[in-house]
Amino acid sequence: MDSYGIVFALAGAISAALFGGLGSARAVGMGGEAAAGVITEDPSKFGKVLILQLLPGTQGIYGLLVAFITLSQIGVLGGSGDVSFVKGLLYFLSCMPAAVVLYFSAIRQARASIASIAVVAKKPESFGKAMMFSAMVETYAILALLISILAITGVGSINI
């Protein structure tokens, strides 16, 4: 039964990277479609719309960070790799806030970014205000990242 611990822990790490990356890839693509439409009309707005397009890409980075921390905690990136069933399940559960929230927040952030790109298309001087709409969604991605990191490191300190 103990050999399944590493499987659960790996599944958690992979889920965080996978869903964070999938959400970000989809979201950045959505933003890119909107940004491309704006620069066909006014190429001078490229820098502003590029920033708005890239904002939802951070969730993929956060997912990768959670995966790296988990892999280092369970010994895959060096160490024994001996993880009990219970501890593996705890690692898996610790990765879930990141896996789920990062995916959905990336998509929601893309929608806010697309709306912000539309604002910049008509009023480029409102870029700072428009960017705040997308940045507010980032807050929840950061909260999910933090809770997953705290849980993962907490599990690492438990003797089970």
Image: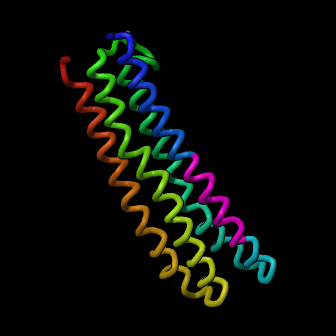
Q: Give residue 16's position: percent from left, percent from top.
A: 46, 39
The stretch drawn in magenta includes residue 107? no
Left or right: 98 as drawn, with respect to 118: left
* Quarter assignment of residue 85: top left
The stretch drawn in magenta includes residue 31? yes
The colour scheme of the drawn protein is rainbow
Q: Main secondary structure of the magenta part?
A: helix
Q: Residue at x 37, y 54 (%)?
A: 142
Q: Give residue 71's position: percent from left, percent from top.
A: 43, 25
**In the rendered picture of this protein, how many numbered marks are placed on residues?**
0
Q: Give residue 6's position: percent from left, percent from top.
A: 40, 18
The quadrant of the rendering that contains the C terminus is: top left
Q: Is residue 21 above or below residue 105?
A: above
Q: Is residue 147 above or below residue 13?
A: below
Q: Residue at x 54, y 86 (%)?
A: 126
Q: Give residue 104's position: percent from left, percent from top.
A: 47, 56
* Quarter assignment of residue 32: bottom right
Left or right: 45 as drawn, with respect to 133: right
Q: Residue at x 47, y 43 (%)?
A: 63
| Residue farthest front in this picture | 1
Left or right: 42 as drawn, with respect to 116: right
Q: Is residue 27 above or below residue 78?
A: below
The quadrant of the rendering that contains the N terminus is: top left
Q: Which range is magenta?
A: 22-35
